Amino acid sequence: MKKLQVLGMGCPKCKQLTANAEAAARELGGDYELTKVTKIEEIMAFGVMVTPALVVDGEVKVVGKVPGVDEIRKLIA
């Protein structure tokens, strides 16, 4: 199972990244778990200082931008 985490406080970009990640995971099929990390202490624990960020299986893949569904699909495939 892929574990996807969107790091961000809930800004519009964070919400868009969540939607894009969910769409990409759905397109790929298979099991995935998507969670949102909104607490600043938890976000900083990943070493992330700029949100939104996408974490795949514990590894930070994207910071400070909102990639499209195709790009996210490649990151989590």
Image (spheres, rainbow, N blue to C red):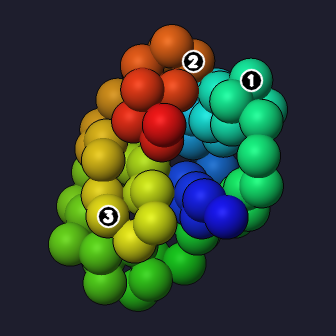
Check contact, mark 3 vs mark 1: CB within 8 A. Answer: no
Tell me if residue 30 can be seen: yes
Q: Earlier in the sequence, mark 3 or mark 2?
A: 3
Give the CA separation, mark 3 to mark 2: 18 Å
Q: Which residue is mark 1?
A: 27
Q: Amino acid at mark 1?
A: Glu
Disc 2, SS = helix
Q: Amino acid at mark 2?
A: Val
Q: Which label sits in the foreground, 3 or 1?
A: 1
Judge left or right: residue 60 versus residue 24. Answer: left
Residue 61 in the image, given as x and y percentages of width and height: 30, 47
Q: Earlier in the sequence, mark 3 or mark 1?
A: 1
Check contact, mark 2 vs mark 1: CB within 8 A. Answer: yes
Judge left or right: residue 34 versus residue 5. Answer: right
State whether residue 41 is above or below residue 8. Answer: below
**Residue 59 tag number:** 3
Give the CA separation, mark 3 to mark 1: 21 Å
**Residue 69 tag number:** 2
Tell me if residue 12 can be seen: no
Q: Which label sits in the foreground, 2 or 1?
A: 1
Judge left or right: residue 59 versus residue 76. Answer: left
Q: Quadrant of residue 67?
A: top left
Q: What is the total number of numbered labels drawn onto the structure image?
A: 3
Judge left or right: residue 25 versus residue 11. Answer: right
Q: Residues within 10 Å of mark 1 (few under 14, many from 20)?
A: few
